[in-house]
Image (tube, rainbow, N blue to C red):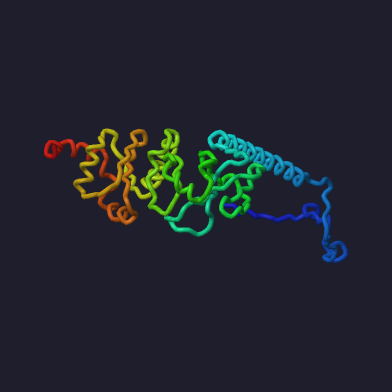
Amino acid sequence: MRSMRFALIVSNAAVARPALRLNAQNFHMGDTTLNYVFYKPSDYYNQLKKSLQLIQQNARDQSNYSHMNNKKYYDRNRSNPHYDINDTILIRIHGLRSKLDPQFTLTPKIAIQKQHPTYWVRDQMNDQITRVHVNDMRPILLPLSFITGYSAWYRFDRTLSVHQTLATREPPKSRHTCRSLPSRIRRNYRRNAVKRSYRDRHCILRLVYHRFKLYQLKHILRQRNVRYVHLKLDKSSQVLSIGMKRSSLVDLYFDRLPGDLFDKKHYYQHRQHQHRYY
């Protein structure tokens, strides 16, 4: 077997010298610029101001539109009473008072000057003049001839109608019979909204098989001794809401109601033994 020899030939042309050499003369560490000026300044700040101006203008327009609608609704559903000179009125009593104290003055007042919504009234007993806002005034729909003195005031006190009863030192009476139909509708709407918010405050949510009926769910809860306030079954999302009276009951009954209690398997088990219950 013939031996082979290898030779390494290095040429001067194969090694390239560096074109730039870094030395102390070409590189100075002390030349650092403190300020830098862009060749073409960016308009980011100007665009930001324009965007903020558009956003604030839109928010201002939305606020003004909301205020206008609220004022229109208030003006349409609230009366704006106007009183004339020599009208007999009562004034609301402000300050700390008990539940049985009168809400309005017992002695009537007479309007002597008006600048709506501010009125100046005069007391018939001591001729004291008071400046009153229209919200603190209530009318007395009686002729002035009846109100000649303090004794006459007690004489026609019992002749007032139900809607014009005065607040005296008597226990508060029910006023539900004095309400109009729109007033009762608004009262019931507010009452139901409050009760609905309390009803959904403490609840347990469970997924339900779509074939479950509400009476079947109630029977299962009775079997497990679960005391609830309301049941709300949403067929579209297949979710059962079990409302509780207190948050402590939610913690107590949470382990009694497993997550798979109302699934398909338990539904057919319940149907199989349903004849034992009914």
Residue at 56% x, 53% y is 125
Residue 244 x, y percent position in the rendering: 31, 49
The percent position of residue 185, horizontal first and vertical second, equals: 42, 35
State the image quarter where residue 52 is shown: top right
Closest to the observer, 198 or 233: 198
Q: Identify which residue, 224 or 72, lies in the foreground.
A: 72
Foreground residue among 80 and 223: 80
Q: Which residue: 63% across, 43% down?
A: 117
* Number of dots carrying numbers: 0
As drawn, the residue found furthest toward the right would be 25
* Quadrant of the drawing holding the C terminus: top left
Q: Position of residue 275 (x, y in %)?
A: 12, 36
Along the viewing direction, whichever of 41 and 14 lies nearer the viewer: 41
Residue 147, x across and y down, in percent: 52, 45
Residue occupying the point 33% across, 47% down: 204
Residue at 44% x, 44% y is 165
Q: Is residue 89 left or right of residue 186?
A: right
